[in-house]
Image (cartoon, helix red, strand yellow):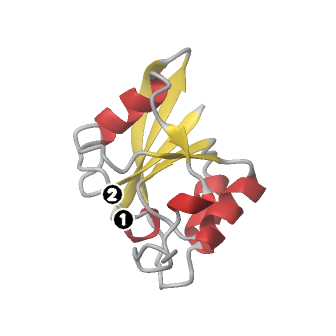
């Protein structure tokens, strides 16, 4: 299983967790098997413009990502990940990539749902 995590430079398990998936510096990709980390590498982010979050969705799918750990995203990219068969989990409180990955592998993260999405640019949807 390949887990994608929005990250700040330089990426890796000790890197700060990127709060909004489409605006991160890069992605840390973690290959995990049987609850253990097997390999860690980084993947550059693609150029992002507000409302253009589907390019990063496709980019992650093209690189074999099965699961994304995210702190924030809009409804359109969440639907895009769902259509691509990529499960998204909410990891907003993780200070680092490693903490987020360990929480996911331990089964401590909830699936990202519509009520967790933001209205674009990181702003929560009112209501």
Nearest the camera: 2 or 117?
117
Picture quarter with the N terminus: top right
Sooner in the amino-acid sequence: mark 1 or mark 2: 2
Q: Which type of secondary structure does the marked residue at label 1 adopt?
A: loop
Q: Position of residue 87 (x, y in %)?
A: 64, 45
Is residue 32 found left or right of 122 in the rendered image? Answer: right
Nearest the camera: 22 or 111?
111
Residue furthest to the front: 127
Q: Position of residue 63 (x, y in %)?
A: 60, 51
Q: Residues within 10 Å of mark 1 (few under 14, many from 20)?
A: some
Question: In this rendering, is residue 41 above or below 123?
Answer: above
Q: Quadrant of residue 21?
A: bottom left
Q: Residues within 10 Å of mark 2 (few under 14, many from 20)?
A: many
Question: In this rendering, is residue 93 above or below 98?
Answer: below
Residue located 47% across and 25% down the image:
105
Question: How many numbered circles are shown?
Answer: 2
Q: Which residue is mark 1?
A: 24
Residue located 51% across and 59% down the image:
116
Q: Which residue is mark 2?
A: 18
Q: Quadrant of residue 54?
A: bottom right
Residue furthest to the right: 83
Q: Are marks 1 and 2 in contact (CB under 8 Å)?
A: yes
Residue located 56% across and 60% down the image:
115
Q: Which type of secondary structure does the marked residue at label 2 adopt?
A: loop
Q: Position of residue 13 (x, y in %)?
A: 29, 37
Mark 1 vs mark 2, CA separation in Å? 5 Å
Is residue 96 found left or right of 112 in the rendered image? Answer: left
Is residue 44 found left or right of 117 in the rendered image? Answer: left
């Amino acid at each position: 299983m390949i887990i994608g995590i929005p990250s700040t430079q330089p990426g890796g398990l000790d890197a700060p967790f990127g709060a909004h998936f489409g605006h991160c510096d890069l992605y840390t990709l973690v290959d995990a098997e049987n609850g253990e980390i097997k390999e860690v590498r980084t993947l550059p982010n693609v150029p992002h413009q507000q409302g253009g979050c589907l390019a990063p969705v496709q980019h992650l799918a093209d690189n074999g990502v099965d699961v994304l750990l995210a702190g924030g995203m809009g409804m359109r990219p969440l639907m895009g990940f769902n259509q691509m068969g990529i499960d998204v989990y909410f990891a907003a409180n993780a200070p680092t990539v490693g903490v987020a990955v360990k929480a996911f592998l331990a089964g401590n993260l909830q699936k990202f749902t519509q009520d967790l999405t933001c209205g674009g640019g990181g702003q929560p949807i009112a209501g």
